[in-house]
Structure formats: structure tokens, C-alpha cells
Amino acid sequence: MTPAPANPMRDPHPFKVGVFAANADRGLTFTTVPEQWRAGWDDVQRAAIAADTGGLDFFLPIARWRGFGGTTHVREHSFETFTFAAALAALTRRIALFSTVHVPLVHPVYAAKALATIDHVSHGRAGLNIVCGWNPDEFDMFGVTLEHDAYRQAAEWSEILTRLYTSAEPFDFDGEFYRLKGAISRPVSLQSPRPVTMNAAFGAPGRDFAARHCDYLFTTFTDLDAGREHVRDIRERGAQAGRELGVYTVAHVVCRATEQEALDYYHRYSVEYTDEAALDYHVRQKKGFSSSHEDRAFIEYRQRFAAGTGSFPLVGTPEQIVGRLAAMHACGFAGAALSFVNYADELPFFCERVLPLMREAGLRAA
Ligand SMILES: Cc1cc2nc3c(=O)[nH]c(=O)nc-3n(C[C@H](O)[C@H](O)[C@H](O)COP(=O)(O)O)c2cc1C
């Protein structure tokens, strides 16, 4: 067997950049602009190849089972993330390919096999983003109740996944959530002991789960001061668990040659053209069932939710955006997953103009 090349998530760049949510219609936006992202396969392929050849580090899908209604039925169309990553593995050469998986909805024995398949097709570029979910309407589709102690289940789920790759013999597992007899999965992943993992969460139980079980936490922040404090907190939790983990965050991007162009476009897609009904539903569900944002974020930053589901805005020229990325790095973040209004159209400009400036700023290795 050919040895696996290192997953690009292990590259020494001080700040990694990837793409988030290109598998879902409208990405992270709630916009109705004509050029809105439809996530058709040919466009997705164009975006993935632009990110791969342009030098980005990872491609990370969102896990969604139903949309948020409104006039656009936003994110009702989304590609399933294991099969999505497997297809992209065959089309790309060097970028890391994550799958985003709901612990309460996907059995770990199934997940281990699917993830190992992607790791082999991609020659070691697979990654796993673990989510516990937050929208009860989505869970109702499966007849599954959204539990508040999902991270206890996630701990067993992760242990099973790793044991399936590391155990030489079939094993039994007798836990609170899983009872397995003679569990085995072949092939094991090329990455050892398992592909890189992140956990998407904001609240304390999610932070602790990431600190104990994952390579990275994937999280949100409202402003730089809150981000710095968040990173400090997770490092402390990691230290208590005897582990060091990277903290990734999420941002939406409008990168244009001039600041005015960027600001005008930002206003156009996230204020003038908003699917208000879908946005209202999303915010109501998120507030009720998730702690992935601080309460004040919903009130103070409605435009951020319309523009990028409450993520951090990167709006401006390439130079201004690199300044903001440097500030995020200074807070301790290891990288960011980015969304765009139209990924395929906007990624080439971003890669050509922003990545060289990041190198100059010391955020990327040569
Ligand atoms: C950056 C980020 C990305 C997330 N991505 C997803 C996703 O793709 N699908 C999903 O159902 N939940 C997603 N979540 C929600 C988490 O899985 C989690 O259920 C939610 O944040 C509430 O739990 P918490 O209190 O641990 O944050 C995401 C959360 C964060 C912070």
C-alpha cells in the first residue's frame, strides 16, 4: 500500500483557511440575490477545484436534513456529507475533505466505514466534523429526540470509532448508548489512529467533549475580545484533559478590489435581498435549542445572520481581510472556515489575492 501523504490539516501554516457550507444552497446566507448559491453539483465541483488548486487547506460541509422555509426554502437542498467528500476526493489532489456527521443520527460503525472509504480514496485527506445537532424539527424526521446530554453519547461514539480502527480483533462494547458485539471495520483509515477530527460547538459540554476527544474545536465568536477569551478557555479545558487542541472558527467573506465595492455588495445581499421569514425561523430555532451563539449576538447582529448565519464578517479589500485574519490569529485561532455568496465565482479572486498577502503577513508558511 502507498504511504498516506500528510493531511493538509497537519501542514505548518500558522493560520489555516478553508471553505464552509458549499454543499448547501445559499451556503451560510439568507439572501435572495440572483447570484445566490444553488449548490448544483457542477458549481460545487468548480468551487472545490478552485479551493484545491488555489491553495486552501480544507473543504468542510454543513450537515442539514431540512431547510429553514421562507421564500427560498434555504438549505433545503444540501448534499449528504460522506458521499460528498468521497466524490470530491476523486476530483481534488491536495485539500483536506471533511464530512460533518450528526452523532445521534449516524451509527459509529457506519461512520467508521464511510470515513475510512474517503480516507483511502483521498490518500489520507479525510477529516471528521462531529455535530450533535440543534434543530428538533430536523430530528423529528428521524423520530429521534434532541437530547441535551448528546455529548455523553458523542464520547462513546468517538471511542467506538477509534477502536474500530485500532483494535486488531473484533470487540464488544457495553456502554450507556451503544451495545456492540464483535465489532470490526476494515479497511482501517490511512491516518492513524483515525482521521483528524473536530467538534462544532460553543457551549461548555461541547468544549469539554472537544478537549477530551478531538483535534480541533470548531466554534463561533462575536468580537475579538470574546474570541480571545474563548480560545483561552478551551486551551485551559484541553490542558486539564492533558491535550492541546486547535480552535477553528467561521467567517463570511466579501472580498473586493475596493472597500466601497465590498461594503455596497455586503449591504445589497444581506440587507436589501434577505429572506426575512427563513431568517426569523432560523433565529427562533437556534435561540431555543442551541447555545452556539451568545444571546446578544442575535439581537445586535441580525445582518450577520442574514449574511453568514451569525459568523464573523470579513468584508473589504484583500489587505483589510488579511488584517482581520491576523487579528483572529492573534486571539489564538488556528484557522477559519469561510463562506461566500457564490463560492465558485468568488474563490479564485480570494485565493489569488489573499493567500500571498497572508504569506507576507506570516500567516502562511512559504
Ligand atoms: C461553527 C459551528 C458549526 C456547526 N455546524 C453544524 C452543522 O453543520 N449541522 C448541525 O446540525 N449543527 C451544527 N452546529 C451545531 C452544533 O452541532 C451544536 O449542536 C450546537 O452548537 C449546540 O450545541 P453547543 O451548546 O455545544 O454549541 C454547528 C455549531 C457551530 C458552533
Image (cartoon, rainbow, N blue to C red):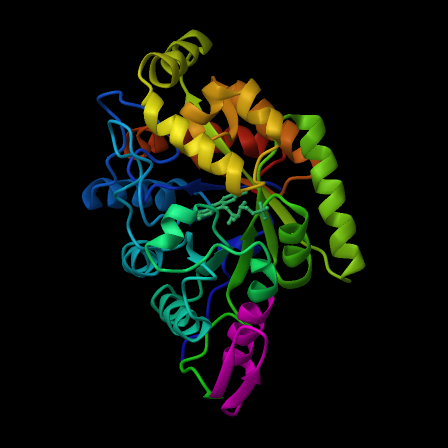
Nearer-the-camera pick, 279 or 350 = 279
Counting from the top left corner in percent of width and height, residue 244 is at 72, 56
Question: Where is the C terminus found, in terms of image quarters?
Answer: top right
Q: Can residue 362 be seen in this view?
A: yes
**x%, y% of residue 147?**
53, 56
Q: Which residue occupies the extreme top position in the image?
A: 260
Residue 331 colored in magenta in the image: no
In this picture, is 154 found above or below 174?
above
In this rendering, the count of numbered labels is 0
Q: In this view, does 162 lie to the left or right of 256?
A: right
Q: Position of residue 103 (x, y in %)?
A: 48, 61
Residue 38 location, quadrant: top left
Q: Does residue 212 appear to the left or right of 119 in the view shown?
A: right
Side of 5 relative to 366 (left or right):
left
Q: Which residue is depicted at the point 51% across and 31% down?
A: 311
Seen at 34% across and 41% down, the residue is: 22
Query: Range of the magenta residues?
Result: 155-181
Task: Examine the rendering and report whether any part of residue 167 can be seen.
Answer: no
In the rendering, at what x and y percent does residue 268 appear?
34, 13
**Residue 163: in magenta span:** yes
Question: In percent of the image, x 33 and y 25: which residue is there?
Answer: 277
